[in-house]
Image: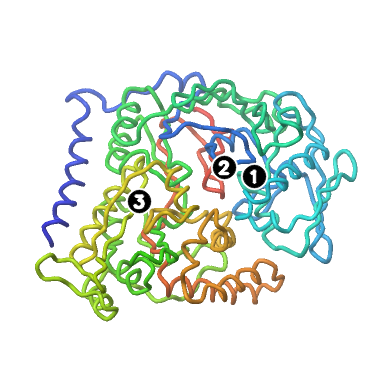
Amino acid sequence: MSKSFAKIMLLIALAATILSACSPAGESSSRPTASASNNEITYATAKDINDMNPHLYTGSMPAQGMVYESLVENTSEGIKPLLASSWEISKDGKVYTFYLRQDVKFHDGEPFNAEAVKQNIDAVQHNAEKHSWIKLSTKIVECKVIDEHTVQLTLSEPYYPALAELSMTRPYVFLSPKDFKNGETMNGVNGYHGTGPYVLTAHEPEQYATFEANTDYWNGAPSIHKITAKVLPAGETTFLALQKGEVNFAFTDDRGADSMDVEAMKQLEASGDYQIVRSESMNTKMIVANSSRSGSPVHETAVRQALWHAVDRETISRDIMGDTETAANTLFSSNVNDADVPLETRSYDLAKAGSLLEQAGWKLDADSGSRSKNGVPLSMTMYYDSNSSSQKIQAELIQSAAASIGIQLKLVGEESASIANRRTTGEYDLLFNQTWGLAYDPQSTISGFTSENAYLHTTQGIAQSGQLYEKINQVMVSSDEQKRKALYADILRTVHEEAVFIPLTNGNITVVAPSNLQHISFKQTQYELPFELMSFQ
């Protein structure tokens, strides 16, 4: 074991010791919040709910999921009705006819009807460039009102993920027509009135937001009467707030940042006042490598493959994530549709990593311990979410292993929104990210390979990018299931060989909640929690 690796393991152990020492001896390690008896939830969030305009992307997805709804819902049993009670698809796969529920109103009292559906979908389509990462946005030709409760969506060609993309948390959800500005939403909105189970009633930026139960909700008023999102720094601050009863709920946020480390959660659970509930594997946590960054070593396949071999996934899974997430060797876990493809396993192997670098001409300087080629140092910058209590430790572990084979990694922690912006602009070498999740994958993450708003910079620099994009275009419109499977297999083999997505662990959604809170479950989207189904015992 290297000294630097031992140092990181010591930091992990020390963090756990500090957390376990936070409660005075002889006192309960947590104090149940009084809000539990009043059917209220106060959850900790590392970031503000921000702009709740559902047709843009700055707002908190868990918050938007409480307020807005889509035509259909993606579940583990497949696509099910939501605001549309039923639908029909034409034989040629181009026309979708939706029959809307007739007992639905927006939070401001406006009726939910076909005109409202058309106005919302048209508003999304009028901002097409913003939504280009969603392939459905490039396929919609017309949204037509048939009658008050029937709407028809016409596509330019068959598109098999259409219903799945209509079920997403945004942008194809519905806002009251009264909230539109000059008939549009791209330049802001006048309010945030959806049809969902909760109504946004108060918002103090960077402090809190309050949501109250929609007593006129079409599917019955929720048992939880009030939900407050309280902005708190992740880590020890959230842990202490749970101990003191200032908040009584915490969960993995919509960018995959964990609010507390595993040891802190275990301590809360051991008190008997809190429970930990985890979803099945929902996503893959990964390092995204920018192949199009020609001035950086990350542009080289051999460098990316070497870095892959320098990631000790088993240690991350066991010692950092406390066995709550499994080591990932591929971009998607085997429970993702069409993604169970046999691919080469690149295990943690520093000797192999060093050999790959040597063969690629990256020579090791014995005095400095660093590599270079043609006067260019083997140095890259890796960005992690500063609100995640585990990403920094993972980054330091990878940095230590990389240094031992001559790769210098500079680590930079930033807000999740800043990292998302870097992914869009291409201003990065390496960054932490995660796949879209069960409801969206593989189609949404793979669609993102061609989108500047997602992973275009990640994939654009590989030698076979043109062929890759052509196969992606084909798979999205193919109605032949076997052909789709073969195309997905080819796509996954290409990005695997090029090592542009370096997997870490198969992630899940983790909830810390009062022990008497019942019916905690998860949506396939991974970005929303069905608070409306929860109740206190």
Kindly report the distance in space between the C-alpha atoms of the residues bearing marks 1 and 2.
8 Å
Q: Are the residues tagged 1 and 2 within 8 Å (C-beta)? A: yes
Q: Position of residue 192 (x, y in %)?
A: 64, 29
The residue at 24%/53% (across/down) is 396
Task: Find disc 3 in the rendering and name its residue.
Answer: 383
Task: Find disc 2 in the rendering and name its residue.
Answer: 57
Q: Is residue 328 left or right of residue 21?
A: right
Q: Position of residue 238 (x, y in %)?
A: 34, 31
Camera-near label (3 vs 1) is: 3
Query: Of the residues under marks 3 and 1, which one precedes in the sequence?
Result: 1
Q: Secondary structure at mark 3?
A: strand
Q: Position of residue 315 (x, y in %)?
A: 26, 58
Q: Is residue 218 left or right of residue 406?
A: right
Q: Nearer the viewer, residue 317 or 443?
A: 443
The residue at 75%/65% (across/down) is 158
Task: Find disc 1 in the rendering and name its residue.
Answer: 171
Query: Of the residues under marks 2 and 3, which one precedes in the sequence?
Result: 2
Q: Nearer the viewer, residue 416 or 27?
A: 416
Q: Residue furthest bottom?
A: 359
Q: Nearer the viewer, residue 390 or 85?
A: 390
